[in-house]
Amino acid sequence: MTDYSKNLEVKISTDVFVAGGGPAGAAAAIACAKQGKKVFLAEAGGCFGGTSTQALVPELMNFDDGENFLSGGIGRTVHDRLFSDTPSNRQWYVVKSETIKLLYDELVAEAGVDFLFYSKVVDVITDNSGRVKYAVLSGKSGIYAVSAKIFIDCTGDGSLCAYAGADFEYGGENGTVAGATLCSVWGGIDFSKKNFIFDGCRYQEAYEKGYFSQYDGILPGIKPTNPEIGVGGGNVGHCFHVDDTDERSITEALLYGRKSMLEYERYYRDYLPGFENATLIQTANVLGVRESRRIIGDIVMNYEHFLARQVFDDEIGRYSYPIDIHPETPDRKGAAEFTQNVSKQYGPGESYGISYRALTPKKLQNVLVAGRCISADRSMQASMRVIPCCYITGQAAGIAAAVACDGGDVHNTDINGIQKRLKEFGAYLPNF
Ligand SMILES: Cc1cc2nc3c(=O)[nH]c(=O)nc-3n(C[C@H](O)[C@H](O)[C@H](O)COP(=O)(O)OP(=O)(O)OC[C@H]3O[C@@H](n4cnc5c(N)ncnc54)[C@H](O)[C@@H]3O)c2cc1C
């Protein structure tokens, strides 16, 4: 241990500070700025979109429940700008990461959000009453502080909340987490010759012939992002036992993920029609992490809420994706549990409510959390982590921050006022 102290320049003072510009952070910043508040967003990477752009995730899950458009507001804008020609019927959408990156650039700028890339929250400064006063940022210019009335943690791994002393849970028993994936870009594919549904359809056979160094029977696959030029986005392979709060663990996962793609390249070429010339073009610079910290809020959304299609008085939206916990271990048990969980699909028109209290971290007065690190048990997190739901929780946090700005306490704020503004913003709130 060593001491380190420094006077920090307060370079920016704002009403609302948003940490992280993934789907949740972009939605939070846009929604809040549209309420007339001064918003500053700090993004550690070089673009908005988070996992979906920097980690090259090639798909967006459903925006609707088969009858109702659930991701109204920002989700509606994204859907209509990118997929207006595809009817919304529990559809999953293949997406080109460059297209969605540009859309976020436009939407964030249009809303009047001030933002910086390559700006990472590395700490916070709090007072004794659980109020965060400053976020400490590291950028190309060095370390500096940003002051705000309300802080929103959209880092995906809940790091701002953790630095501020929030309680959190991590993974399951013994800290096991859903497998991470190093997503990838592939070329040389003739998608017109594809005559199978699942890319893993011949995995067992190949595994038994020694194609793979570890068992990983769940293979989401290569999606046709640019089929006209034979290019696809790969959600291929898993890195197991990754601790997303430990850079050594992430380093090892990236090394393994890159190497493992060569095994998949051989599998695709030898087994799958249309993929005879499949060529790995690139792996992402950022590991795709599905599960990390889950911040403990005033309520923990849980599996019972999922089963009950719960309605909350303070709901800020509703969503309907199944429980999608990817295998935690490289064996058949992990794959079987995954298949059993994702089979628990809702029927058309069914959804669960999301309580505002899942966005309010206990102990912290002026901090909200949105996106994949909100307050939920593992099952519920595995449903709420997908992108259209991150728009729902992100925009709710943004609007709640605008409402809480003057009082400064996110736990005692006007929930009716938040719901009213959300509804005006386009959110799906049938019970309000
Ligand atoms: C392999 C994989 C496949 C997936 N497939 C799908 C799919 O098909 N469809 C779907 O809808 N969802 C999918 N998901 C889920 C979805 O991509 C993520 O859960 C979602 O992007 C989470 O959004 P978020 O905004 O909460 O966090 P993230 O997308 O993780 O964004 C967080 C952002 O915060 C930034 N950040 C982190 N720490 C800091 C810090 N300290 N300071 C400043 N900035 C910081 C990061 O750089 C990042 O840009 C997948 C996820 C993975 C990993």
Image (cartoon, grey):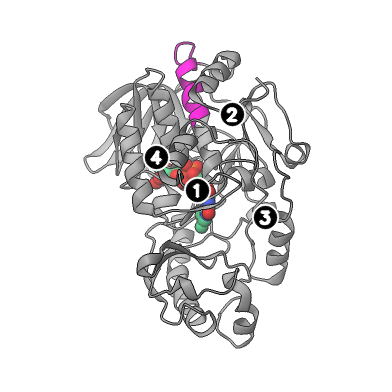
Q: Residues within 10 Å of mark 2 (few under 14, many from 20)?
A: many
Count the labels in the image: 4
Of the image marks 4 and 2, the number of the one nearer the N terminus? 4
Question: Magenta span: helix, strand or loop, mainly?
Answer: helix
Q: Residue 73 appears at what percent x and percent y?
A: 49, 30
Q: Nearer the viewer, residue 335 or 344?
A: 344
Magenta highlight range: 395-408
Residue behind mark 4:
21
Q: Nearer the viewer, residue 365 or 227?
A: 227
Q: Name the element at disc 1.
A: loop
The picture quadrant where one finds residue 363 is top right
Q: Amino acid at mark 3?
A: Asn
Q: Name the element at disc 4.
A: loop
Badge 2 vs badge 1, beta-carbon distance below 8 Å:
no
Q: Amino acid at mark 1?
A: Thr
Q: Residue 273 appears at what percent x and percent y?
A: 51, 80
Determine which of the numbered discs, if any, sits on residue 86 in the image.
Answer: 1
Badge 3 vs badge 1, beta-carbon distance below 8 Å:
no
Q: CA distance from mark 4 to mark 2?
A: 23 Å
Residue behind mark 3:
174
Residue 403 shown in magenta? yes
Determine which of the numbered discs, if any, sits on residue 339 in the image.
Answer: none
Nearest-to-viewer mark from 4 and 2: 2
- Mark 4 residue's CB less than 8 Å from ligand 1: yes
Badge 4 vs badge 1, beta-carbon distance below 8 Å:
no
Residue 156 visible? The answer is no
**Residue closest to the far left:** 141
